[in-house]
């Protein structure tokens, strides 16, 4: 492994560690409702790392790249939460809802109304 790759991996591990330490105060978790306890710390840590990797260290500057992360259990008839979808993003919830409607419309081969996402 080259020194550059080793340094990059070390930086990524350190970012994950930092994000895990601050998971309860995630920049990406806004007013989106509760994440299932099983996934909360990991999703917040990943959101912090993704946001930092795409947008740099936390600043007051506008973000350039948005992301969304879905986490769900695969279907298991024994799990009461089998239909639960956990969501986290660094974007505004209303903009994400518009983006999802537009994306689903494209997947279904139809058009959606104009949005802002």
Image (cartoon, rainbow, N blue to C red):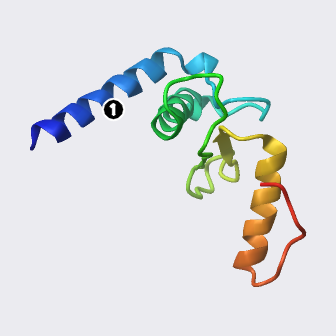
User: Where 82 sits versus 27, above or below?
Assistant: below
Q: Quadrant of the C terminus?
A: bottom right
- Give x and y (percent) for residue 107: 70, 77
At 59% from the left edge and 22% from the top edge, which residue is drawn?
Answer: 59
User: Residue 81's quadrant in the figure?
Assistant: top right
At 81% from the left edge and 64% from the top edge, which residue is drawn?
Answer: 101
User: Where 112 sits versus 78, above or below?
Assistant: below
- Give x and y (percent) for residue 83: 70, 53
Q: Report which residue position mark 1 lands on.
A: 12
User: Residue 18's quadrant in the figure?
Assistant: top left
Q: Quadrant of the N terminus?
A: top left
Query: In the structure shown, which secondary structural element does the residue marked by tag 1 occupy?
Result: helix
Left or right placement of residue 34 versus residue 24 in this view: right
Left or right placement of residue 80 versus residue 117 in this view: left
Left or right placement of residue 63 versus residue 116 in this view: left
Q: Hey, which residue is sitting farthest bottom in the picture?
A: 109
At 11% from the left edge and 36% from the top edge, which residue is drawn?
Answer: 3
């Amino acid at each position: 492994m080259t020194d550059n790759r080793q340094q990059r991996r070390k930086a990524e591990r350190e970012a994950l560690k930092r994000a895990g330490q601050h998971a309860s105060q995630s920049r990406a978790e806004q007013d989106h409702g509760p994440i299932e306890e099983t996934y909360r710390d990991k999703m917040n840590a990943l959101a912090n790392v993704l946001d930092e990797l795409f947008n740099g260290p936390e600043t007051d500057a506008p973000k350039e790249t948005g992301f969304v992360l879905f986490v769900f259990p695969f279907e298991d008839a024994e799990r009461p939460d089998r239909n639960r979808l956990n969501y986290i993003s660094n974007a505004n919830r209303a903009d994400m809802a518009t983006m999802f409607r537009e994306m689903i419309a494209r997947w279904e081969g139809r058009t959606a109304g104009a949005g802002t996402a």
